[in-house]
Structure formats: C-alpha cells, structure tokens
Image (tube, grey):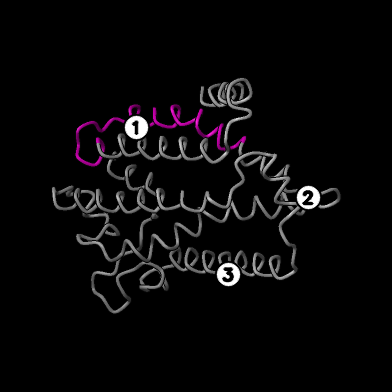
Amino acid sequence: LGNLIFIMGLWLVKKRFLNSSWRMMLIVTTVFLLLLDAFFIMLTVFDVVRNQYFYLGETVLEEVPRAANFVVSTFVIVEMADHGNEGLVYGLMTTAANLGSPVARAIGNQIYRLFEPSISSTNNYIEDTLAFRRTVFYSFLLSYGFGFLSLVVLYFLPRQKAEAQERKATWSRRPIYGYVTVAMLSVAFVYSLTVNFMSMFPSTMCLKFAGGDGCNSALAMPPLSSNSSNSSNVLLR
C-alpha cells in the first residue's frame, strides 16, 4: 500500500507540481512531515493511543510528501550534472544524503545522554513515569527543532531548473570547492562510523563519546538509537 501511494505521489508531482518552486515544495513537505510525525509521536508518548497499527499508519501518510522530496532531489542531480560526470555527481549527492541518518544518530547519541531521566535506560521505558514521558517529549522537540532549522539552507537551493542552469553558467568554479566537499563528507563518514560502532560493543558503549553514561558509572547503560521512531517503538512495547 505504501509503495502504491508513493507512485501516486510521483504522478501527482508530475501532473500538478512539475514546474513549482523546488524550495517551496521542500518547505511544505518537510513541515508537513514534521507536524505529522509530531502528532503520532505525542499521542504515543503520553499514552493517548498506543496501538501499533495506529502508529504504523504514519508511514503510509508520509509517502506522498516523500515522493515530492524524491522528485526534487532527482531534479537537482539532473540539473547539476554535466556531460561525462553524471555518475560522479549522482554518487556525491546520494552519499551526502545517505550520510544524514548515521551522522544524526551519532550526534543524537551524544546529546540525548544528557537528558534526565536517562533515555538510554530500558527500565525508564518500562516504568513509563510522567517525568520520563516529558523527557522523551523534549527529546523529540529537539529533533523537530533541528528539522525546522535545516530549512535555512534551502536558500542555496535553486528555485527551478532555469535558475540551476543560470548558476552553472555564471557562478565561479574552483577546485577548492570539491576538496572541501569531499573533506566534509569524509569527516562526517568517519565520525558517524566511529560513534555508531562504539555504541555497539560492550567495551566501548559505556563511553560518553558513544552516548553512554561513562564506564566508571555503576549505572552505565548501552545507548539507545537516537532515531525518533525507535523511542516510540520501545514505548509501544
């Protein structure tokens, strides 16, 4: 069903929004996805509705805006690529996009360890106290804040293919831009790989750098994933 709705979303973008502003499409779909996720999350966190089928319904409703995001990202790659470097541009863009999730998870592991009561403790999810529900609520608010903050960088996204072509023709090209881009992606890759792997092994998962409470702490617990859906899945159990 989700794939069918995704296909319908692609068709809708083709028929109605093919020439719409890429910036506006991303703003509308991102805000919609964040608000939709917040609706389901809050009902789950505060024990208003804790039903796995209700929660999983969110994934179906997200398919249309996700389809719009996919189309915009594809258009950007097509317009940025020149003859002969299509594979390089596609690989660079998809690498940057795919790095977002592991980097966010690594940063989340380090930030969320500061929350009290600890959201790394499985016992807190089992006890499910009001104080802990509020802590989980604040952690999601923080994640949504980063989501809204990401919209600021849309200023650098062309509005449509005509503006993308104009930028390619008029903006300066320097090797340093490529070096900086590759360096940033490399640092992000090494950082996310290090933190996420350290959080998997018993000997290192207690380290604060990996999101633990410290290996000298008697209450050292393995960090849970910072992905927002994982926290809700624990609550649903």
Label 2, label 3: how many angstroms apart (C-alpha)?
22 Å
Q: Is residue 65 left or right of residue 173?
A: left
Q: Nearer the viewer, mark 3 or mark 1?
A: 3
Q: Residue furthest left?
A: 130
Mark 1 — residue?
55
Image quarter of residue 111: bottom left
Circles 2 and 1 in contact, beta carbons < 8 Å:
no
Question: Residue at left 37%, top 47%?
Answer: 228
Q: Nearer the viewer, residue 142 or 203?
A: 142
Q: In the rendered image of this protein, does residue 68 appear above or below residue 176?
A: above
Q: Which image quarter is the C terminus in?
A: top left
Mark 3 and mark 1 lie on one chain; the one further toward the N terminus is: 1
Image quarter of residue 52: top left
Circles 3 and 1 in contact, beta carbons < 8 Å:
no
Q: Is residue 79 left or right of residue 60?
A: right
Question: Residue at left 14%, top 49%?
Answer: 129
What SS does tag 2 mark?
Answer: helix
Circle 1 packing at 10 Å, graded few (<14), some (14-19), many (20+), is: some
- Give, as a single range, the part of the protein colored magenta: 43-71
- Amino acid type, label 1: Tyr
- Amino acid type, label 3: Val
Mark 3 — residue?
187
Q: In the rendered image of this protein, does residue 112 appear above or below residue 236?
A: below
- Amino acid type, label 2: Gly
Q: Nearer the viewer, residue 56 or 10?
A: 10
